[in-house]
């Protein structure tokens, strides 16, 4: 179906898009607010290094674990209904997180937020695919959707920093409550409901298999970061991979699968997912490390750190709205490859940051990193959603969000653990003799632990710890630079078959299941 014959969206659809952008802003807020709040949170709850990573990761991993389930559930019970249920749950659990008085309760609340958040993103994307049938309008709408996430990330540090300067760290979570209320009021008026026809039975065994597949892998990643490739780590990884194979095999046999694995036959779908996954790994790790660098090494209070994080997030905003427009004249593969090349330059700049004053270099480098993020978030998501037929839009949207959330969480685990390993290697032997055991353990575990000790450590020792943390940042950014450069080249190759957005040529060589070749959603 050509772009000239499909139904074009009107004022109601664009108003509905504004409503659908609200939960996206909310999730962007939730990501960056916690990064800014982490030092204050660590000072209050005193989590260990591993617990701090769980506070950061539980949300993303549980989102990744439940996105496929929630995407398909929305197709069955109604995408708008699931969106509203998720928004209500997200607001309620945010209150629990705000008033958590222990590390364990906060980790549990973050996990629950992940499950609630898993209902939001695939519902918004799937509804966009229903409301915007014209390829160019859909591409622009998804660009707006992606910029909403950027807007949330940009506002999170600034608004969160302002709140932290006046209130306790838990107040940052309460930002979700008014957003959830507005969505619940406006959604029934502007967003149409959609249920997939002939959706069939909801397979609970597939839900269980999907969780058993991903959770052991999550455990293996976390344990590897802490203890290396020991026997429990290897066993957990093998269990996860085994059940992943069982899950995929079952999906291929079901008439109404939780995840239609035939979608992966579409070359556009598979290539775009791969770019999203790998690209987000570098972003997830760098976001954690840069935020800590600004507050713990540069010594900025939360509100100033948030303000400095604003310009990079705005770069993502520009890329997410601009990339779909450029892709109307330039093939998306070239646009993605070019912006990822600029991200590589950004990571390279971050390898040169030192502990004696590198704020300008951080802002410029991280801004270039976010430029690539904006482009792949908008174009990659559009390619994934556009490759699926309407009745599979929820499943396709869920896969897009799954790889993005998993990429962010893996980035925190992999690059965060790499930076921590460098820190521990440089600090371990430098802790002065006679330091109390508890202080030595905290100082050797993380820079946040060292900074929290304050006057308990000898004069000048904290400078060594800051230099060690900066070396960890530099090393992690070097790895991210190499990976992103390789991804830039691969993007130009694996996406080269895709024509400009809205052109007459089909976007992929093979049609999505249930659609004729060249059909548009």
Image (spheres, rainbow, N blue to C red):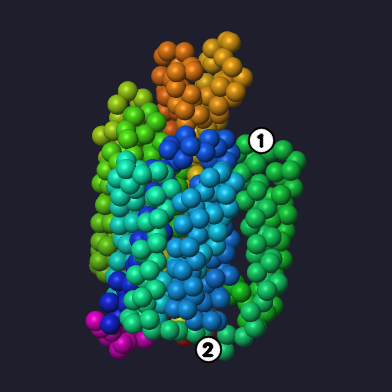
| Quarter occupied by the C terminus | bottom left
Percent x, y for residue 239? Answer: 73, 54
Label 1 neighbourhood size at 10 Å, few (<14), some (14-19), many (20+)? few
Residue 505 visible in this rendered orientation of the protein: no
Residue 362 visible in this rendered orientation of the protein: yes
Q: Image height check: is 458 above or below 358?
A: above
Percent x, y for residue 110? Answer: 53, 53
Say which of 299 and 130 sits in front: 299
Q: Which residues are magenta?
A: 1-11
Q: CA distance from mark 2 to mark 1?
A: 49 Å
Looking at the image, residue 346 sits to the left or right of residue 103; the answer is left
Looking at the image, residue 76 sits to the left or right of residue 217; the answer is left
Residue located at (28% from left, 77% from top): 15
Pointers 2 and 1 in contact (C-beta within 8 Å)? no
Residue located at (52% from left, 72% from top): 71
Give the image quarter of residue 121: bottom left
| Quarter occupied by the N terminus | bottom left
Mark drawn on residue 227: 1
Percent x, y for residue 499? Answer: 34, 70
Label 2 neighbourhood size at 10 Å, few (<14), some (14-19), many (20+)? few
Mark drawn on residue 197: 2
Residue located at (69% from left, 60% from top): 212
Magenta stretch secondary structure, dominant:
loop
Q: Is residue 4 magenta?
A: yes
Q: Decide which of tag 2 and tag 1 comes sooner along the chain.
A: 2
Q: Is residue 85 magenta?
A: no
Label 1 sits on a secondary structure element that is helix
């Amino acid at each position: 179906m050509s772009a000239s014959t499909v139904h074009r969206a009107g004022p109601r659809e664009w108003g509905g898009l504004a409503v659908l952008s609200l939960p996206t802003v909310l999730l962007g807020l939730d990501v960056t607010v916690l990064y800014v709040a982490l030092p204050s949170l660590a000072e209050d709850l005193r989590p260990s290094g591993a617990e701090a990573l769980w506070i950061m990761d539980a949300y993303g991993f549980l989102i990744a674990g439940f996105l496929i389930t929630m995407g398909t559930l929305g197709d069955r019970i109604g995408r708008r209904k699931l969106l509203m249920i998720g928004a209500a749950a997200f607001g309620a659990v945010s209150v629990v997180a705000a008033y958590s008085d222990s590390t364990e309760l906060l980790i549990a609340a973050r996990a629950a937020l992940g499950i609630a958040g898993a209902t939001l993103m695939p519902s918004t994307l799937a509804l966009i695919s229903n409301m915007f049938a014209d390829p160019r309008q859909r591409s622009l709408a998804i660009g707006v959707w992606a910029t909403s996430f950027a807007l949330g990330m940009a506002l999170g540090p600034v608004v969160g920093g302002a709140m932290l300067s006046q209130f306790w760290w838990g107040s940052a979570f309460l930002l979700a409550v008014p957003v959830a209320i507005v969505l619940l009021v406006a959604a029934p008026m502007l967003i149409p409901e959609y249920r997939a026809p002939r959706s069939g039975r909801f397979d609970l065994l597939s839900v269980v298999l999907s969780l058993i597949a991903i959770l052991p892998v999550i455990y293996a990643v976390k344990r590897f970061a802490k203890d290396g490739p020991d026997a429990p780590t290897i066993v957990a990884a093998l269990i996860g991979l085994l059940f992943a194979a069982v899950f995929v095999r079952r999906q291929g046999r079901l008439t109404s699968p939780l995840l239609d694995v035939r979608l992966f036959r579409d070359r556009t779908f598979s290539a775009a997912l791969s770019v999203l996954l790998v690209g987000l790994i570098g972003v997830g790790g760098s976001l954690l490390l840069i935020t800590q660098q600004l507050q713990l090494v540069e010594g900025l209070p939360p509100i100033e750190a948030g303000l400095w994080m604003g310009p990079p997030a705005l770069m993502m905003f520009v890329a997410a709205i601009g990339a779909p427009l450029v892709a109307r004249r330039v093939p998306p593969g070239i646009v993605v490859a070019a912006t990822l090349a600029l991200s590589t330059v950004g990571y390279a700049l971050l390898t040169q940051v030192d502990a004696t004053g590198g704020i300008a270099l951080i802002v410029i480098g991280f801004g270039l990193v976010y430029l690539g993020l904006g482009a792949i978030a908008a174009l990659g998501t559009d390619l994934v959603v556009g490759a699926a037929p309407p009745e599979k839009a929820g499943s396709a949207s869920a896969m897009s969000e799954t790889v993005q959330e998993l990429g962010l969480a893996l980035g925190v685990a992999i690059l965060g653990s790499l930076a921590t390993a460098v820190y521990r290697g440089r600090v371990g032997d430098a802790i002065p003799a006679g330091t109390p055991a508890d202080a030595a353990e905290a100082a050797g575990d993380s820079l946040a632990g060292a900074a929290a000790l304050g006057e308990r450590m000898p004069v000048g020792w904290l400078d060594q710890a800051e230099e060690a943390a900066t070396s960890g940042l530099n090393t992690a950014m070097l790895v991210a630079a190499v990976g992103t450069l390789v991804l830039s080249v691969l993007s130009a190759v694996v996406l080269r078959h895709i024509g400009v957005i809205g052109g007459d040529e089909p976007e992929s060589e093979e049609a999505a299941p249930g659609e004729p070749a060249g059909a548009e959603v």
